[in-house]
Image: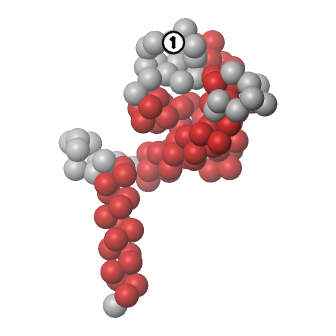
Amino acid sequence: MKMKVIAGCVMMALMILTGCGQSDQPVTRGEVADRNAAMEVERCARQYLGKSNSGPDTEVWIMCLHSSSELAGRNKINVAHQVIRYQKKNVFETSGSSAELSKQLIDRINRDE
């Protein structure tokens, strides 16, 4: 009985975190995995942002994107889009007030710099 309650709570939490019921489109397992990886990117970035020994904020976000996406086995561009969605701004580029990734950044992410 306890396991069913725990499983129900976990499912409910996942539904809330993934935004189930907020759109007409179903959420795929891949999107859920990308969102989970995006949360790891944010967690990673929060550890380094503003520290005296870390680089510029955009570099921290990109470093965390690379490591978290690799560990989760997810596409870096898809995860980056989820991070932008959660942050409500493009944290990967200083000049990017747009919520879209520039072609130059996409190329850089794909080159694993």
Q: Is residue 45 left or right of residue 52?
A: left
Quarter holding residue 99: top left
In percent of the image, x 58 and y 45: which residue is there?
Answer: 43
Kind of residue at badge 1: Gly
112 above or below 100?
Answer: below
In percent of the image, x 31 and y 64: which residue is there?
Answer: 12
Q: In this orientation, which residue lies closer to the viewer: 66 or 59? A: 59
Q: Is residue 89 left or right of residue 44?
A: left
78 above or below 21?
Answer: above
Q: Spot the residue most to the bottom.
A: 1
Quarter of the picture containing the C terminus is: top right
Percent coordinates x, y for residue 93 in the rendering:
58, 17
Residue for badge 1: 96
Q: Residues within 10 Å of mark 1 (few under 14, many from 20)?
A: few
In percent of the image, x 23 and y 44: which residue is there?
Answer: 22
Q: Is residue 19 something one can see in this rendering? A: yes
Q: Tell how many labels.
A: 1
Percent coordinates x, y for residue 2 in the rendering:
37, 87
Q: Is residue 53 left or right of residue 58?
A: right
